[in-house]
Image: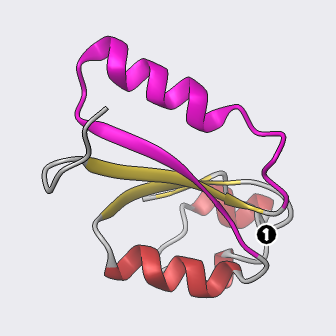
Amino acid sequence: MEINVNTALYGIIGNPLGHTLSPAVHNSAFKTCGIDAVYLAFETPDPFTCLKAAKALPIKGLSVTIPYKSVIIEHLDYVEPRAAEIGAVNTVV
């Protein structure tokens, strides 16, 4: 896979992420479908700094996993009503 200026960036944010299959699954799907994109794991003890970096970079979307599904809500620009009702999000775009 060649990553260049046109490659779309996606990822997963959580801690720990050693168990996640998301990057392998998504990157395989991107390759199979001929999509110029990469899906990265962002394991971090500070989800808010990671979210701020994602906003500054051309990251198109993030999957959110434990333990950040609920705490990240207060740092989002918009939350779908159902997600607000539940108090957790799985995806940030």
Displayed quadrant of residue 89: bottom right
- Relative depth, front residue between 2 and 23: 2
Quarter of the figure with the C terminus: bottom left
Residue plotted at (74% across, 61% down): 14
Residue 67 placement, left or right of 37: right
Residue plotted at (52% across, 56% down): 62
Position in image of residue 42 (x %, y %): 62, 62
Q: Secondary structure at mark 1?
A: loop
Magenta extent: 16-44
Displayed quadrant of residue 36: top left
Number of numbered discs present?
1
Above or below residue 14? Residue 63 is above
- Amino acid marked by disc 1: Ser
Residue plotted at (13% across, 50% down): 6
Displayed quadrant of residue 61: bottom left
Please identify the residue farthest to the left as the structure is shown.
Answer: 6
Residue 22 placement, left or right of 44: left
**Colouring of the image:** secondary structure
Indicate whether residue 41 is drawn in magenta. yes
Above or below residue 59? Residue 57 is below
Residue 29 placement, left or right of 32: right
Position in image of residue 79 (x %, y %): 54, 68
Position in image of residue 19 (x %, y %): 84, 40
- Relative depth, front residue between 2 and 64: 2
Above or below residue 27? Residue 10 is below
Position in image of residue 26 (x %, y %): 50, 29
Residue 92 placement, left or right of 44: left
Indicate whether residue 17 is drawn in magenta. yes
Quarter of the figure with the N terminus: top left
Please identify the residue farthest to the top as the structure is shown.
Answer: 32
Q: Which residue is mark 1?
A: 70
